[in-house]
Image (spheres, rainbow, N blue to C red):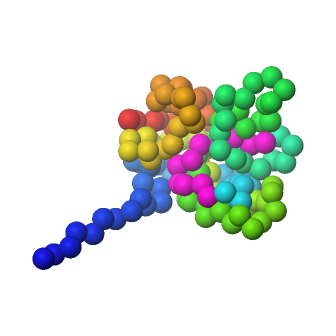
Amino acid sequence: MTSVLHEGRRNVEWILSAYDLVYSTDEMQVDAVATHQSGTLLGVTTATGVAVPWNPALAGDAQDGSQVLAGILYRQIDGDSTLAAGSSVKAAVVTRGPVEASSSNGRIPYPAGYTFAQVKAALAALGGGGIVLRD
């Protein structure tokens, strides 16, 4: 009997189309301790300048900069829990369009409690627009 093989998630499968990814990406320091899948929405902490998963729910004194959407991680980062807290690695982050992205099947994971419409609105405002999110 023939066995069926299932292919896992690919890097950047969330990108449906992009005119020029060299123009659309910037290099950022991204947290290297945790694993972050390709398509992770990122915010930048003001104290360290390190990008971490976007946390729009932060309010008041808890705000650390990560509540402001800064971009979408281009390729997965395999974290290393043996690194010191705050360790970072350079990574490509999509910060502006023209890019068409897909959130279907968890390709772009949303923060807990957030909807497609909220994430789409935040991405539309990022980098002067140009990042279009499809479901």
Left or right position of 116 against 62:
left
Q: Examine the rendered structure and indicate whether residue 62 appears above or below residue 49.
A: above
Q: Identify the residue at the far left of this view.
A: 1
In reply to whether residue 97 is colored magenta, the answer given is no
Whether residue 102 can be seen here: no
Left or right position of 56 against 87:
left
Q: Examine the rendered structure and indicate whether residue 47 appears above or below residue 59.
A: below
Task: Classify residue 133 by image quadrant.
Answer: top left
Image location (x, y in percent) of residue 24: 58, 48
Residues 1 and 130: in front is 1
Image location (x, y in percent) of residue 57: 67, 28
Residues 87 and 12: in front is 87
Residues 43 and 101: in front is 43
Q: Quadrant of the C terminus?
A: top left
Q: Which residue: 65% across, 44% down? A: 53
Q: Which residue: 38% across, 41% down? A: 104
Task: Classify residue 65 by image quadrant.
Answer: top right
Left or right position of 120 against 87:
left
Q: Examine the rendered structure and indicate whether residue 113 appears above or below residue 79.
A: above
* Magenta span: chief secondary structure: loop
Residues 110 and 70: in front is 110
Q: Which residue: 38% across, 44% down? A: 105
Q: Quadrant of the N terminus?
A: bottom left
Left or right position of 31 against 14:
right
Image location (x, y in percent) of residue 103: 43, 40
Q: Identify the residue at the far top of this view.
A: 60
Q: Identify the residue at the far bottom of this view.
A: 1
Q: How many marks?
A: 0
Image location (x, y in percent) of residue 32: 71, 60
Whether residue 28 can be seen here: yes
Q: Which span is picked out in magenta?
A: 35-45
